[in-house]
Amino acid sequence: DVQLQASGGGSVQTGGSLRLSCAASGFTFDDYVIGWFRQAPGKEREGVSAISRADGSTYYADSVKGRFTISSDSAKHMVYLQMNALKPEDTAIYFCALVRGSWNLLDYIPPYAYDYWGQGTQVTVSS
């Protein structure tokens, strides 16, 4: 079974940094996208960033461009989200998810398209 394990959340002050990790396991297919989503209390789940294993292309939400960087270690099926210059509005539970296939990350992939989800990790940014 495909499993995703997110980690690295925590509490920081405004302007601080955190690095989230997503460990994917239990599959043998080569082409997939791993995305990071977040959900704050009372809000819908929103896409933050994504990376394609097929070609390394990436997606960033406008709200995090220039502050967050997604990267991957394909050999280890690990994906990282480096979050810098954090703001209180970044406070949310962060989830990683996986969808099979070679996707064009010029287009946003909505949550319902993803096949597998990990548990969330809490990120809290205080002012």
Image: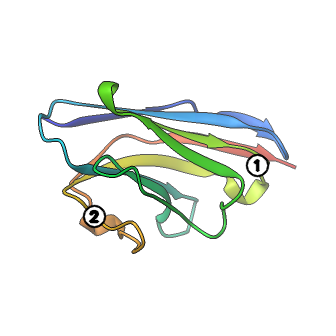
Residue visible at 11% across and 34% down in the picture: 28
Q: Which residue in the protein does label 2 denote?
A: 103
Mark 1 Cα within 10 Å, few/some/many (few <14, many 20+)? many
The secondary element bearing badge 2 is classed as loop
In this rendering, position of residue 67 left or right of residue 70: right
- Amino acid bearing label 2: Trp
In this rendering, position of residue 110 left or right of residue 11: left
Residue visible at 31% across and 26% down in the picture: 75
| Image quarter in which the N terminus is found | top left
Residue visible at 19% across and 57% down in the picture: 101
Marks 1,2: beta carbons within 8 A: no
Residue visible at 34% across and 49% down in the picture: 97
1 versus 86 height, above or below: above
Q: Residue 59 placed where, x, y %?
A: 48, 62
How are the colours assigned in the image? rainbow
Q: Residue 71 placed where, x, y %?
A: 50, 41
- What distance separates the C-alpha of mark 1 from that of mark 2? 28 Å
Q: Residue 104 placed where, x, y %?
A: 33, 68
Q: Earlier in the sequence, mark 1 or mark 2?
A: 1
Mark 2 Cα within 10 Å, few/some/many (few <14, many 20+)? some
Q: Which residue in the protein does label 1 denote?
A: 86
- Amino acid bearing label 1: Leu
35 versus 59 height, above or below: above
